[in-house]
Structures are given as C-alpha cells and as structure tokens.
Image (tube, helix red, strand yellow):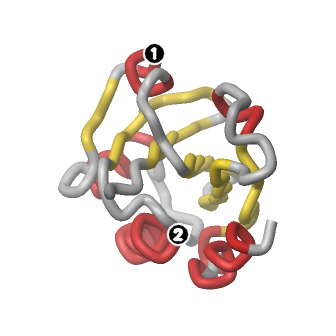
Amino acid sequence: MTTACLTIIEENSEEKAVLYREFDGYPIGNGQDLKDYLDDFAFDVPGLSAHRIVAQLENCHQLLDSLEAKNLDKQYIYTISIRDGYLNLKVQGLSFLYPELPDEAGMATLYDGDLRDFDPYLADSNWYNQ
C-alpha cells in the first residue's frame, strides 16, 4: 500500500505550489527527502523563492493544481514556508482519533519549526504516539 502526501510551498503566507507524492509520504521517507533536497536552502539564501524550491523537488513530486490536489487521498501534508529568508517545515499526519474529518481538520501536527531542526524519526514516532 502506498503512503501518499502533499507538499505545499508557501511564500509570504501565500500558497505558491502544491506537489503530490504517491509513495513514501511518511516522515522518514518524504520528510527526510525534503530535508536532504532542501538542506542547501535551509539557511538565509539570497533569492530564495518558491520557484527555486519547486525546481529542487520536481524529480520525486508531481506538480498539481491546488484544487485538484486537495481532493486526493493523502496521509501526510508537508508545508514549507519561506519566512524571513529561512525555511519552516510543518508536518501533519492523518489523525487516528478523527480519520473521518475532512481535509486538515483530521490532521495531527507532528512537527512545526525550522527545517534544519527537523528529525523525521521523531515526527514519525509522534504520529504513532498520538
């Protein structure tokens, strides 16, 4: 069974792109890949933009229309936000407690902070321990 996820790229609190990944969507898979792919961008980089981030992730994600993406089944949502030249990562996983709730209402936050401090194993254990 595949573990699907969405990765949302935000710039100045505005959604710029939505990427879909049909497999390995759990924190140890997609979360680690995001950290690896974006490690060079995690610090204050001149010209850091959503466009540059999407270019880094295109090899393992499918760029989708925002409305189309929100209707897909997904178990995880990753939101990458550019804040003051740094990358913030928020990881949400489908909650065991409320799996019937639509969209983000049924998602538990597993991590929300600086991309450089993200530990995919800890986020994964937070999901299992909810």
Residue for badge 2: 27
Nearer the N terminus, badge 2 or badge 1? 2
- How far across and down, in percent of the image, does residue 95 sit? 72, 50
Residue 17: x %, y % from top left? 43, 32
- Which residue, as the protein is rendered here, is positioned at the far left? 59
Tell me the kind of residue under disc 2.
Answer: Pro
Q: Residue at x 45, y 50 (%)?
A: 47
Location of residue 102 in the rendering, given as x and y in whole percent from the top left corner = 67, 26
Q: Residues within 10 Å of mark 2 (few under 14, many from 20)?
A: many
Residue drawn at (40%, 49%), measured in percent from left and top?
4
**Residue 111 image point, x, y percent:** 73, 65
The label shown at residue 88 is none
Q: Residue at x 80, y 49 (%)?
A: 97
Q: Is residue 68 visible?
A: yes
Q: Residues within 10 Å of mark 1 (few under 14, many from 20)?
A: few
75 or 34: nearer the eye? 75
Give the spatial CA distance, label 2 vs label 1.
Answer: 24 Å
Q: Could you say whether the residue bearing mark 1 is in a helix, strand or loop?
A: helix
The answer to whether residue 41 is visible is no
- Residue 87 is left or right of residue 56, and the answer is right
Note whether 98 is above or below 87 in the view shown. above
| Three-letter amino acid code at the position of disc 1 | Leu
Residue under label 1, please give it.
67
Please state if 91 lies on the left or on the right of 46 as rendered. Answer: right
Residue placed at 57% from the left, 78% from the top?
A: 120
